Image (cartoon, rainbow, N blue to C red):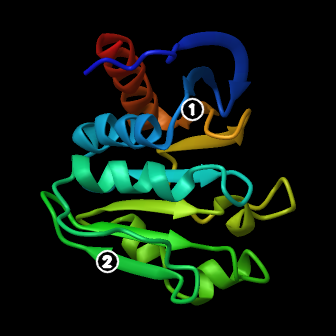
Amino acid sequence: MDMPGTSTESTGAQHVGSTVTQARSVSVEQTRRVGLALGALLAPGDVVLLIGDLGAGKTALTQGIGAGLGVPGVINSPTFTILKEYTGRLPLYHFDLYRIESPDEVYALGFEDYFAGEGVCVIEWAERGEPREQDVPPPWPIDYLRITLRASGPDERMIEVTSAGPRGAAVQAALARAIVEER
């Protein structure tokens, strides 16, 4: 699949011990195709944290991830329900933390059970679930991908991927290869 305008590079920037992979998307469809490539790589227990302002493309990326997992039908943001579950090759647990008031709510709602489950967790507004104190661990497992989306034009998005843990790093590297191969 051709992805004109998409570039991937690793920089020296660090996040939880990993390099930063960057991709540029020039359309909503291209953002979905990045998600599609990622969804094809994901395995049970994988966690994908999505960071970005309203309209940055988090749900479009999640729609692509769902397609890569073989989820039929429409995927939309679970803003009011906080969690939606979809069935595909693997279960997709789609979280939206926009409405939570405190990171403690992630624990109180029992979401950590999903993080160790048989499906894939995609968490929009993940930064709202992260503790503000540096010595408090986040609720996610030690392996995850962190994807930050930033609007850089009406339809253009910069996508930055970092990771934590060995599984997160392996998925990040595989995604970077998949994006380059699709150009």
Q: Amino acid at mark 1?
A: Val
Q: Taking 105 as reference, is 147 above or below it?
A: above
50, 19: nearer the viewer: 50
Q: Position of residue 106 (x, y in %)?
A: 61, 78
Q: Earlier in the sequence, mark 2 or mark 1?
A: 2
- Is residue 22 toward the left or the right of residue 130 in the image? left
Q: In screen coordinates, is 94 left or right of 150?
A: left
Q: Nearer the viewer, residue 139 or 1?
A: 1
Which numbered disc covers residue 161? 1
Residue at 66% of width from left, 50% of height from top? 56
SS state under label 1:
strand
Q: Quadrant of residue 58?
A: bottom right
Give, as a three-letter code, the residue at label 2. Answer: Glu
Q: Residue drawn at (74%, 33%), measured in percent from left and top? A: 152
Q: Is residue 123 left or right of residue 99?
A: left
Q: Residue furthest left?
A: 89
Task: Give the residue furthest to the front.
Answer: 154
